[in-house]
Image (cartoon, rainbow, N blue to C red):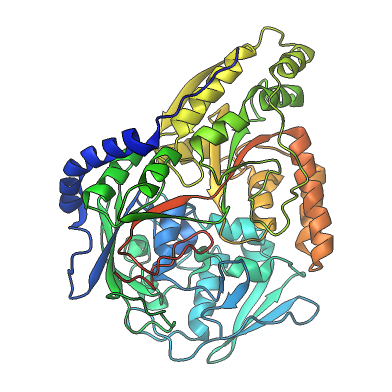
Amino acid sequence: MTHKLTRTGPELTRRGLLQLAGAGAVLLGAAGCGTAGRAETGGATFVYGRSADATSLDPMNQTDSESYAVIHQIFDSLLRYAPDGTLLPALAAAVPAPENEGRQYTFELREDVRFHDGTPLDAEAVVFNFRRWRESDHPYHRGGGPQSSKFAYYKNLFGGFDDKSVISGVEAVGSHAVRFTLREPYGPFLPTLAGAQFGIASPTAIRQDVDGFWERPVGTGPFTLASWEHGSKITLRRNESWWGKRPTGPGRPVDTVVLTPMPDSTARVAALVGGGLDAVNGIVPQDADAIRDTSGFTVVQHPQECFSYFAMNTRRAPFQNPLVRKAIAHAIDLPTIVEHFFGERAEVAGAPLYGISAFVDRSIQPHPHDPELARKLLAEAGLPDGFRTSLWYMSTARPYLPDGKGVAQVAQANLADVGITAELVTYELATYSERTGKGLHDIAIYGGTTIGVDSYFPLNYWYASASATPESSSNLSFYQNSQVDALLAEARVTTDPEEQRALYANVQRIVHDEVPVLPIAYVSPPVALRSSVAGFGTNIAMDDLDALSR
């Protein structure tokens, strides 16, 4: 049986619904975060509706993109990414060259940079941050709030804490110079430091209240945190003493940014149309089409920075058997799912990696939809009558998954066609992440938003054996393959791009053949805006808001 979907035409029907809903949504927007564009502090205000609230604003103690989006405004890292993925200096005055055959790097810092609390950024501040992350017995190696990741990104990116860390030492070699010593050459070292999780925090603020820092962060970035009303809004104020150079727009500079969580996509878009919001993310393709057809609004697209997938839990029967995983890969109609739930700029994913990654292997083709082959593989696996399982999806829209329920329902129908009965299970985002991290799922829909074009981090994060931890696992298939581990270990210590390309391609092909995850889509997430907003950019993984005007 073939399942066909019908789309609601956006030209009149969808737009009309949104405009009708917008009449009430303006009240919601005004009650939740103030009238869009209102001058609250003498300048312009930008009100941004998004699918979820942040979980923690302590950079190294969170793992979700909604937290990243705020952290990116409050903190600066040593390096940053240009929109095309090129590395640029940030708090560092220049991108350093490797020394001692790639075992040392010396960063010269910008001078006259201050944290939001007025304390100076210097070499000792950078050393403090890295020692806090690296040393498990450091007095401030804690914090992050009730949903702390416990420095999971540092552990994953650098192999662990203390003696397990690739970084063996970090020291001040001048008032504004910091030297990193590595145990071995580490190819992804510089791209890694450009991530938002490596935002440099005020040592003074951490010492004063490390356990409360997650909701009262202090960085050097273009905005300061004014307030955080959990579940309601985050308000940011323009940092007039920011070291960076802001482009000048045609209107008034935005000095207040309000980020409001609204889980329902239609409600977000209706609030935009109704006047309660200036911009929204996490919108479904039909809404993006309707907004493009509505006067006074525009839609901008990020690059293919998002990637979505089905993770099959290889710790649970019958997913230990690769024949079962391959059967599921051929049972699910990916082209139909991507066409109807991800938008025209999305692409059915073949390689199990971000579409904009430097070393994504585009020659890897998606698993074709072939129900007959799926039934044959199930029979070979000893399951000619299929089996019962669960299929988990997020109830909250994500940039990599704008309509989790819709995707899950189509996949459920596809699986039923080959004899697999899948019960749909959903949770709100924080609970979903916690329970999948513990491996309580059978099949789970997940994904991510890249922090750059580096390929080592996502491949290691999703497919390395060491990432399949009992708690807070990032390897949601709990896949373990010694050949993949060896290839990643080899790629980590080479700085030759062509060697890296070959090694990463081998990893992608092994994962593709063994199917611990079924890639769904390379996603270019849309953001809908009022046409009166100027200067809104879409940097890799985060929106740069410092150039906004209206």
Residue 469 lies in quadrant: top right
Tell me: 545 left or right of 19. right
Say which residue appears at 51% left-offset and 45% top-offset: 400
Quarter of the rendering occupied by the N terminus: top right
In the foreground, 440 or 34 = 34
**Is there any visible trace of residue 283 in the rendered image?**
no
Residue at 75% over, 45% down: 508
The part of the image, by quadrant, that contains residue 546 is: bottom left
Left or right, 22 with respect to 430, comes to left
Q: Is residue 161 left or right of residue 511?
A: left
The image quadrant that residue 41 belongs to is bottom left
In which quadrant is the C terminus drawn? bottom left
- Labels in figure, total: 0
Residue in the foreground of this view, choosing between 310 and 366: 366
- Residue 247 at what x, y percent from top left? 41, 79
Query: Is residue 337 placed above or below 416 in the rendered structure?
Result: below
The x and y percentages for residue 99 are: 75, 82
